[in-house]
Image (tube, rainbow, N blue to C red):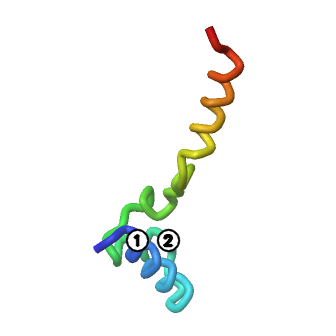
Amino acid sequence: MPTEARKTWAQQLQQNHSVTIAMSCAIVGLSRCAYYYQAKLQDDSVIVSVLNAITDRHLR
């Protein structure tokens, strides 16, 4: 089962049945670290453009 689906189920348990985050994660088999995890960047294009700008300024 994908982590995102388990996270959604855990959130639904919290809203509908007033259980804690720890309890809802245990019920759906999700670690609390995975529950709180948020990806930092969806796309590397920002990093690539910054690196390109740096290399353009420092040509040999």
Assess disc 1: are there few (<14), some (14-19) or many (≥20) residues with their C-alpha within 10 Å of its C-alpha.
many
Q: Are marks 2 and 1 in contact (CB under 8 Å)?
A: yes
Residue 31: image quadrant is: bottom left
Amino acid type at circle 1 is Cys
Amino acid beneath label 2:
Ile
Q: Residues within 10 Å of mark 2 (few under 14, many from 20)?
A: some
Secondary structure of the residue carrying tag 1 is helix
- x and y percent of residue 34 in the render? 42, 60
Q: Which labelled disc corresponds to residue 21? A: 2
Q: Quadrant of residue 25?
A: bottom left
What's the residue at 45%, 68% (across, down)? Answer: 22
Taking depth in this image into account, of 41 and 6 the one nearest to the observer is 41
Please state which of residues 60 and 30 is positioned toward the viewer in this rendering.
Answer: 60
Up-down relation of residue 36 to residue 43 (above or below):
below
For the image shown, how many numbered marks are present on the structure? 2
The CA span between labels 2 and 1 is 6 Å
Residue 51 is labelled as: none
Q: Is residue 54 above or below residue 9?
A: above
Residue at the farthest top position = 60
Where does the C terminus fall, quadrant-wise?
Answer: top right
- Label 2 sits on a secondary structure element that is helix
- Location of the N terminus by quadrant is bottom left
Q: Position of residue 41 (x, y in %)?
A: 56, 50
Above or below, comparing residue 32 to residue 14 in the picture: above
Position of 55 with respect to 42 (left or right) is right
Q: Closer to the camera, 41 or 20?
A: 41
Task: Describe residue 29's horizontal placement relative to residue 55 as left or right.
Answer: left
Residue under the point 62% across and 22% down: 55
Residue at 65%, 34% in the rendered image: 50
Residue 58 at x, y percent in the picture: 67, 15
Q: Residue furthest bottom?
A: 16
Question: Circle 1 is placed at which residue position?
Answer: 25
